[in-house]
Amino acid sequence: MRVLIGVSGSIAAFKSLILARLLYKEGHEVGVVLTRGALNFITPLSFQELAGARVLTDDDFFKGNTHIDLARWADVMVVAPATYNVIGKVASGIADDLLTATAAAFPHPIVFAPAMHTEMWHNRILRRNLDILRGVGHVILPVGEGPLASGDVGEGRMLEPEEIAHYISRLERLMEFWAGKRVVITYGGTYEPIDDVRVITNRSSGRMGLALASWLSMARAHVVAVACGGVPTAPSAEFHRVGRVLELRNLLLDMDYDYLFMAAAVSDYAPDYRPGKIKKSSDVLTLHLKRTVDVLSELGRNKKGTLVGFALEERDRLEEEAMRKLREKNLDYVVANPIDAIGSERTEVFLFGREGLLGRYSGNKWQVASEIVMRLASV
Ligand SMILES: Cc1cc2nc3c(=O)[nH]c(=O)nc-3n(C[C@H](O)[C@H](O)[C@H](O)COP(=O)(O)O)c2cc1C
């Protein structure tokens, strides 16, 4: 693979040398873009010598269409270390140097490995910028906790180069399996209207579906993203947004797919819809809820490809419930997670196939999603 490493001005820049070397030794072709900030910490020569890399800096920015050529050249782009500054610039659509202009032109999700001091890592502007990047499908690798270059101890250390290399290298295997496959991913929580103003929904953040869409888009699958409710758009070749369970059902039953990941949290019950706005007239308002259609069962009865269901269960009944769902609904796989995972960034999942447990993964949802798509590629 052709891997483009963007290096920005963090004290962790020396680790990107090790990353470049590891990727080179694994047989990848390595390209490097250094920001002006990065040049304070590391030299182009080191990358050239250690990784046979083509190294570019801002001196190359206005020598033709370098950013476009680089973005077209790379199969994968990883920004490691990613500074507070570079994260903010990419999230804000700023492209005033070679690294950020290349990021703007790169048509696939980008992998960011942040590195910064703990105070910067907890800064609320950074939090918002990371959410923006995730929301448009980029992958944010987790940071480590431990001694920082300043001598302090805390969160914000860049992930070790070996771990970053591991994620990048597995993309090659993912591409072999997923490239060109039509993959439908539903995510978020359905909205069932009570009247024209209020809805019943749930606390699904859509993060797991977004993370799956990021990895599969990077692996060049033809991703069809189906967002339920107000969750962010996902990186995809096709995008749909639905509200009600029935809308979701009608859309999905019409779709062809090689794989369908049903990561959306679908309402089991819906109220009787009343047009207009229910007046605040009495102290108690009773809503009658009726069972909604079981979308997954219908998909299981009209199967067009591999069906992956998701189950949110109590920990002590996780396996039993996941296997029951798999059999009763004619699914191929079930990703089961404990109830405490809903709406949170970290999760723990259990992947079941027809024969039982295939794997157990924990971490942030981007790490776990990568394990799931990897495991399915190796079955
Ligand atoms: C010694 C030193 C270490 C730094 N380390 C980091 C760091 O780890 N992470 C970070 O976000 N910024 C760090 N900075 C600040 C950035 O270098 C600065 O914001 C710079 O403008 C980043 O430019 P760039 O993102 O274009 O490379 C450091 C600055 C100095 C002087």
Image (spheres, rainbow, N blue to C red):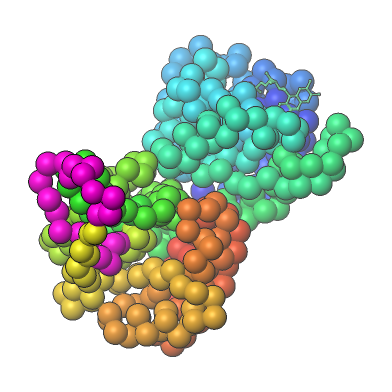
Q: Is residue 180 left or right of residue 167?
A: left
Q: Which residues are magenta?
A: 266-285
Q: Is residue 260 left or right of residue 350?
A: left
What x and y, as percent, mark residue 292? 20, 67
40 shown above or below 264: above
Q: Quadrant of residue 315?
A: bottom right
- The reply to whether residue 371 is in sight is no
Query: Can residue 198 be found in the magenta stretch?
Result: no
Q: Residue furthest right?
A: 151
211 shown above or below 148: below
Residue at x 70%, y 25% (from the top left corner): 9
Query: Can residue 276 be found in the magenta stretch?
Result: yes
Residue at x 14%, y 54% (from the top left corner): 273
Q: Nearer the viewer, residue 99 or 234?
A: 234
Q: Residue furthest left?
A: 275
Residue at x 28%, y 62% (from the top left corner): 267
Q: Nearer the viewer, residue 347 or 3?
A: 347
Q: Nearer the viewer, residue 118 or 272?
A: 272
Q: Quadrant of ligand 1?
A: top right
What x and y, as percent, mark residue 6? 60, 32
